[in-house]
Image: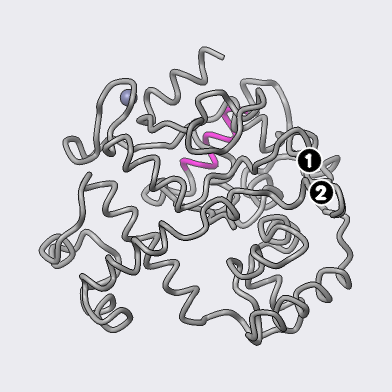
Amino acid sequence: MKFELNDYHRNILDQELIQDVQDVAKSLGKDTLTGSEYSLHGKYYDSTLRRRFGSWKKVLEACNLETVGHNFKCNISNEEMITDLKRVAGIVNLESPTRESYDKYGKYHSATLCRKYGSWNNVLKFAGMKLNLNRKMLNEEMFEEIERVWTILGRQPTTTDIKNGISKYSLNSYARRFGGWRKALEAFVDFINSDAEILAEDKCVEPNTPKDVCDDSKENAMHKTSRDINLRLRFKVLQRDNFKCCACGASPAKDASVELHVDHILPWSKGGETVFENLQTLCSKCNLGKSDMQ
Ligand SMILES: [Zn+2]
């Protein structure tokens, strides 16, 4: 599964994201954009915007851009999707599968279903399943927050850091869920070290599964991995690079305005895969400079 990992752009206002998409469309003289076009020319990744708004279609709607002419629908029928969800629910013995369990056992990639239905909760709602407010899912959100804080600090966060309000969850919330801050960190480390490889795969490109006809399906078909970098993989790359930009050395720990991205060394659009060796940490400035030069 991909943790549609981490949103490093949480502090950016919707309006700034919308403005950037509109600026890119304007600069290209187009009344609409695909996610790939935006990623190539925009300040952010299309995946960041998809996460914020729910789908690429919703991004276009928010930006007042044309949505006609895009094929947003994946040709997985509702029935196929529901059947497969129920099958996975049976395997994992849960009323409704989490994204993570679905990505482990499901026929499709959860990101594909999320794109089709808007969000994982919508997928479950559509299938008549209970919303997944279960423990596992909440843990993932808390892990995502630990990763964000860890990256900002450039080191393992302490209870003092959390008390000082750097995390959106309080020390008490971590204690209630994991039994203490130390235990929360241990659970986080276990989580980061668990099956990263499985999660990096995009099952949509396997020959036996229906072809995903989302707007980036052509590019997907040339890849073994999904473009999205999951939470685990991203964290491992950040950690390897000491939470610093590989090009200029900037780090959020020294300068709060620095935002770190995990970037494909050989761009995904040129066939680069989403694997540890092909990923590097760059600050948003160097990353933007890099995409300008391409
Ligand atoms: Zn840099």
Residue for point 31% across, 29% down? 245
User: Assess mark 2: CB under 8 A from ligand 1?
Assistant: no
User: Assess mark 1: CB under 8 A from ligand 1?
Assistant: no
Q: Which mark is residue 64?
A: none
Residue 77: x, y in percent?
89, 65
Foreground residue among 13 and 294 = 294
Please report contact status of discs 1 and 2: CB closer than 8 Å, yes or no: yes
Q: Earlier in the sequence, mark 1 or mark 2?
A: 2
The part of the image, by quadrant, that contains residue 81 is bottom right
Give the CA distance from mark 1 to mark 2.
6 Å
Please tell me how crowded label 2 is: few (under 14), some (14-19), or many (20+) other residues with Cα within 10 Å: many
Describe residue 177's horizontal placement relative to residue 52 as left or right: left
Which residue carries the number 1 mark?
A: 217
Helix, strand or loop for the magenta stretch, by majority: helix
Q: Is residue 181 above or below residue 267?
A: below
- Magenta highlight on residue 20: yes
Quadrant of the drawing holding the N terminus: bottom right
Q: Secondary structure at mark 2?
A: loop
Describe residue 206's horizontal placement relative to residue 179 as left or right: right
Residue 19: x, y in percent?
52, 37
Which residue carries the number 2 mark?
A: 212
Q: Secondary structure at mark 1?
A: helix
Q: Which residues are magenta?
A: 16-24
